[in-house]
Image (cartoon, helix red, strand yellow):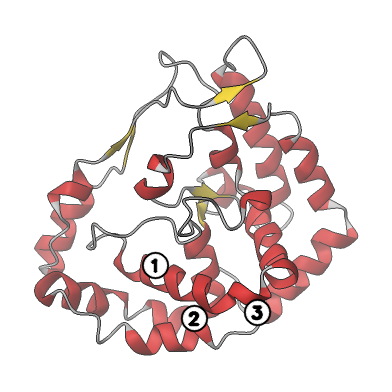
């Protein structure tokens, strides 16, 4: 969404105005959770995050995860290009131990997963039926049925200190507070349409690769869909891995 120079200006603005502290105060209103560590939700994909959350994650990667830059950037690039055609893609921040490499700055959607009752939880399908038809009709790119039909169901393996599940209105109110922070960077109508709510890998690749590389996404997807190969992807992975935070 923002190129590096603009991103650094946004980071400066967020730090000067204590936006990260405000974000943490919203997070602190959620109960601490523990789970079985099955990573089912992480294997399902990378959830959406507000722009201010992306800035928080970017700063964390820059300052705390320098030794893992190449690994994370490589996996994030693959996810960005292939999430709709490769059933093996999972959240690029999930490490080999089935734990989150950016757990400290995970987005609100991750933090709130498991806090709703089964009755209130809305099964998280990918909403790909219409997109699948469009990709096939216009580009002859096949989105696998496994992805189209996959759902993120309610999880009974999340535990937290409170006796009762949270209300949907409570979570919506907290999310709205984070959205207000995004309004300091982007127009209100864009935020209202969830235009700043993107998966971390998408936010990251918008910064790292820029619009030129994004424009070639369809070609990379089609090569993998038709042949199962990643030759067109390689230069983008190399470019991303050379990025300096």
- Whichever of labels 2 and 3 marks the residue nearer the N terminus, that label is 3
Q: Label 1 belongs to which residue?
A: 80
Q: Is residue 12 left or right of residue 50?
A: right
Query: Counting residues from the N terminus, which is met first, the one under dot 2 or under dot 1?
Result: 1
Give me the residue at 85% from left, 61% from top.
Answer: 15
**Mark 2 touching mark 1, by CB under 8 A?**
yes
Residue shown at 54% from the left, 41% from the top: 110
Mark 2 residue element: loop
Q: CA distance from mark 2 to mark 3?
A: 10 Å
Q: Nearer the viewer, residue 126 or 138?
A: 126
Q: Residues within 10 Å of mark 3 (few under 14, many from 20)?
A: some
Q: CA distance from mark 2 to mark 1?
A: 11 Å
Q: Are marks 3 and 1 in contact (CB under 8 Å)?
A: no
Q: How far apart, in angstroms, are the residues tagged by discs 3 and 1?
A: 18 Å
User: In terms of depth relative to the viewer, which is nearer, 119 or 177?
Assistant: 119
For label 1, the crowd category at 10 Å Cα-Cα, with few meaning under 14, some 14 to 19 and many 20 or more, is many
Residue labelled with disc 2: 209
Front-lying residue, 38 or 209: 38
* Tag 1 secondary structure: helix
Which percent across, then down, holds residue 27? 72, 37
In the rendered structure, the answer to whether residue 82 lies left or right of residue 154 reads: left
Apparent side of residue 5 relative to residue 108 in the rendered image (left or right):
right
Where residue 113 sits: x, y (%)?
51, 32
Q: Quadrant of residue 10?
A: bottom right
Instruction: Give the position of the N terminus as an image quadrant.
Output: bottom right
Residue occupied by mark 3: 4
Residue 242 in the image, given as x and y percentages of width and height: 54, 88
Instruction: Look at the picture and state if 75 lies above or below 124.
Output: below
Q: What SS does tag 3 mark? A: helix
Residue at left offset 49%, top offset 59%? 95
- Other residues around mark 2 within 10 Å, as few (<14) / some (14–19) / many (≥20): some
Query: Mark 1 or mark 3, which is nearer the start of the sequence?
Result: 3
């Amino acid at each position: 969404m923002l190129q590096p120079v603009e991103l650094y200006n946004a980071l400066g603005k967020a730090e000067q105005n204590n936006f990260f502290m405000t974000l943490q105060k919203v997070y602190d209103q959620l109960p601490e959770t523990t789970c079985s560590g099955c990573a089912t939700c992480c294997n399902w994909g990378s959830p959406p995050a507000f722009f201010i959350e992306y800035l928080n994650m970017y700063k964390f990667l820059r300052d705390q995860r320098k030794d893992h830059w190449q690994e994370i950037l490589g996996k994030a690039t693959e996810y960005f290009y292939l999430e709709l055609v490769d059933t093996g893609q999972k959240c690029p921040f999930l490490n080999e131990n089935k734990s989150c490499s950016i757990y400290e700055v995970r987005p609100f959607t991750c933090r709130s997963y498991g806090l709703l009752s089964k009755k209130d939880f809305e099964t998280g399908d990918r909403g790909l039926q219409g997109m699948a038809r469009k990709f096939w009709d216009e580009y002859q790119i096949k989105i696998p049925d496994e992805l189209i039909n996959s759902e993120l169901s309610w999880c009974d393996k999340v535990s937290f200190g409170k006796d009762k599940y949270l209300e949907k209105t409570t979570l919506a109110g907290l999310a709205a507070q984070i959205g207000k922070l995004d309004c300091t960077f982007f127009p209100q109508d864009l935020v209202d349409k969830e235009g700043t709510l993107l998966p971390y890998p998408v936010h990251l690749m918008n910064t790292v690769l820029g619009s030129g590389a994004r424009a070639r996404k369809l070609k990379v997807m089609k090569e993998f869909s038709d042949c199962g190969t990643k030759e067109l992807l390689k230069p983008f992975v190399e470019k991303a891995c050379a990025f300096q935070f």
